[in-house]
């Protein structure tokens, strides 16, 4: 549920997943956990990946029934003191197995193995780690990380394990342990999650046409005159832009669909506007007030990401607040 439910709305998405049976959710920040707790229709565990971030974090976690992921010895010390004072608290213990991002180092794990007293009062629900290269199933680092994870768990008090993100889930049963943590795959991202078959698209994105013009003579389009179009070309200007997360990198590279026809972006993406060449769309099929599909079954999140030179994660989480979000097919509708 990080980044406002991958840009799709933490409340509606969280509620839909809850109705589908999900009872364990992960967020990055405390504030996300609070928002999700308020939105969920019933009880669930909500884990905060960034752990204790200073201030009275422990008090806020308690007040909203949130469970921290402990990433450092300082996290453990602070949460342990709080837990002993309050009569016990749950947590997840994070270990780094080769990503060098968050989690206890091998030396810190070994120190806990020698003296587990800092964990007194803490009920460790899971020991977790995160895979760095899981989208590439043949990368030997996946097995290296899994082996290091096993070694770390062997030094720590007995607890359930979790290492698989979306891509890790597709690596198979040895990586599943007791809890998988799929994220982007739930929202239709396939190419950067190592999906064995394309995931069903769950996001559609439309842009409204503001104006259609027929070019009088060969001319350049947009800022910097980066694209020239011939006389007779028909251009549609759409109300969206990089302020809405339609990345500037899509200038002269992106595509949409209009009237069932693939139409290219021409010129640079502006803050609020995109220009498409609709010359191949039958005349009269679309006009001002019509939509161009920016994301659809024919032009997926992964397709747009490839055109922008990025990954589907960034496309989704960049979706701006000015889009009107319509939820269909589930409780959020």
Image: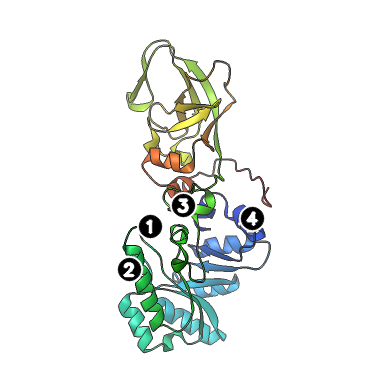
Disc 3 or 4, which lies upstream in sequence? 4
Report helix, strand or loop for mark 3.
loop
Q: CA distance from mark 3 to mark 4?
A: 25 Å
Q: Which mark is residue 16?
A: 4
**Residue pointed to by mark 2:** 144
Q: Earlier in the sequence, mark 1 or mark 4?
A: 4
**Element class at badge 4:** helix
Residue 130 vs residue 31, the one in the foreground: 130
Residue 196: numbered disc: 3
Q: Secondary structure at mark 2?
A: helix
- Reading the chain from its start, which is encountered first: label 1 or label 2? 1
- Give the x, y percent position of residue 183: 50, 57
Return the x and y of residue 147 as percentages of the image width and height.
35, 72
- Tag 1 near tag 4, CB within 8 Å: no
- Whichever of callouts 3 and 1 sits on the residue coming sooner in the sequence is 1
**3 and 4 marks in contact (CB < 8 Å):** no
Residue at the image position 42 percent from the left and 89 percent from the top: 117
Asked whether, in this view, residue 15 is left or right of residue 252, the answer is: right
Residue at the image point whose x is 55% and y is 84% from the top: 88
Looking at this view, is 174 or 52 the one in front?
A: 174
């Amino acid at each position: 549920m990080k980044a406002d439910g991958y840009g799709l709305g933490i409340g509606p998405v969280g509620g839909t997943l809850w109705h589908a049976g999900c009872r364990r959710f992960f967020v990055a920040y405390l504030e996300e956990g609070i928002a999700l707790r308020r939105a969920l229709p019933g009880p669930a565990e909500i884990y905060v990946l960034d752990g204790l971030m200073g201030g009275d974090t422990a008090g806020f976690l308690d007040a909203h029934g949130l469970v921290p992921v402990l990433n450092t010895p300082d996290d453990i010390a602070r949460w342990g003191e709080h837990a002993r004072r309050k009569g016990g608290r749950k947590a997840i213990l994070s270990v780094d197995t080769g990503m060098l991002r968050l989690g206890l180092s091998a030396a810190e794990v070994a120190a806990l193995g020698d003296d587990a007293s800092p964990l007194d009062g803490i009920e460790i629900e899971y020991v977790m780690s995160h895979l760095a290269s899981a989208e590439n199933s043949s990368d030997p680092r996946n097995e290296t990380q899994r082996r290091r994870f096993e070694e770390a768990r062997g030094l720590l008090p007995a607890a359930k394990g979790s290492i698989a993100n979306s891509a890790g889930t597709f690596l198979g049963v040895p990586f599943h342990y007791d809890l998988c943590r799929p994220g982007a795959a739930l929202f239709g991202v396939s190419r950067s999650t190592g999906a064995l078959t394309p995931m069903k698209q769950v996001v559609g994105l439309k842009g409204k046409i503001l104006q259609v013009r027929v070019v009088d003579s060969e001319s350049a389009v947009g800022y910097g005159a980066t694209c020239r179009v011939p006389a007779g070309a028909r251009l549609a200007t759409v109300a969206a832009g990089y302020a809405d997360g339609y990345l500037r990198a899509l200038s002269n590279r992106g595509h949409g669909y209009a009237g069932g026809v693939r139409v290219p972006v021409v010129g640079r993406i502006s803050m609020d506007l995109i220009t498409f060449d609709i010359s191949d769309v039958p005349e009269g099929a679309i006009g001002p007030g019509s939509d161009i599909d920016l994301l659809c079954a024919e032009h997926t999140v992964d397709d747009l990401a490839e055109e922008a030179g990025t990954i589907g994660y960034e496309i989704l989480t960049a979706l701006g607040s000015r889009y009107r979000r319509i939820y269909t097919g589930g409780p959020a509708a």
